[in-house]
Amino acid sequence: MKDILFLLPADLVDEDGRWYCRECAEVCGVLAYYPRLADVLDIREVAHPKPRAAIVELIGEAHQNAPTLVIGDDARVVPAQVPVKQANGRRFVDDAKSIGLYLAAAYGIGRPH
């Protein structure tokens, strides 16, 4: 299974108007810098309102943050500086900086500075 990256779409709307998720935008920027990641990741957009069924199905209701990257390869060695979490027998990272660190270690791109 490929690593699965969950992101919120741009131009979300609520009672305060239009907005975007800052951390999802940061991860989208990394994807723009390194377009080859689109070939190795399963990138999925999830709706803003919870529950986010696609995430819940993999790592449970308590972990619906976006962005979230669910690590697909159980054998992949992840460096200690990447704060990996675990739920439902799956490993994941769920903030932009951790996702950047993971992508750097797993796919040889630049790391966040």
Image (cartoon, grey):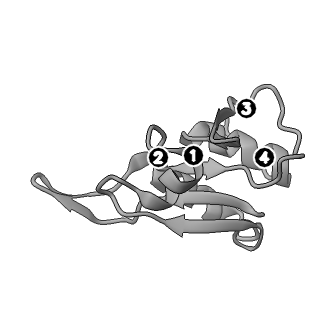
- Alpha carbon separation for disc pair 1 and 4: 23 Å
- Alpha carbon separation for disc pair 4 and 2: 17 Å
Image quadrant in which the N terminus is located: bottom right
- Alpha carbon separation for disc pair 3 and 1: 18 Å
Which amino acid is tagged 4?
Ala
Q: Position of residue 42 (x, y in %)?
A: 66, 67
Q: Nearer the viewer, residue 82 or 1?
A: 1
Q: Is residue 92 above or below residue 47?
A: above
Which amino acid is tagged 3?
Val
Tell me the residue that label 4 is attached to. Answer: 104
Tell me the residue that label 2 is attached to. Answer: 23
- Alpha carbon separation for disc pair 3 and 2: 17 Å
Q: Nearer the viewer, residue 70 or 96?
A: 70
Q: Which of the two discs, 1 and 2, labels the residue nearer the N terminus?
A: 2
Q: Position of residue 7 (x, y in %)?
A: 49, 59
Q: Position of residue 77 (x, y in %)?
A: 89, 39
What residue is at 33 percent from the left and 56 percent from the top?
A: 20
Tell me the residue that label 1 is attached to. Answer: 59
Q: Which of the two discs, 3 and 1, labels the residue nearer the N terminus?
A: 1
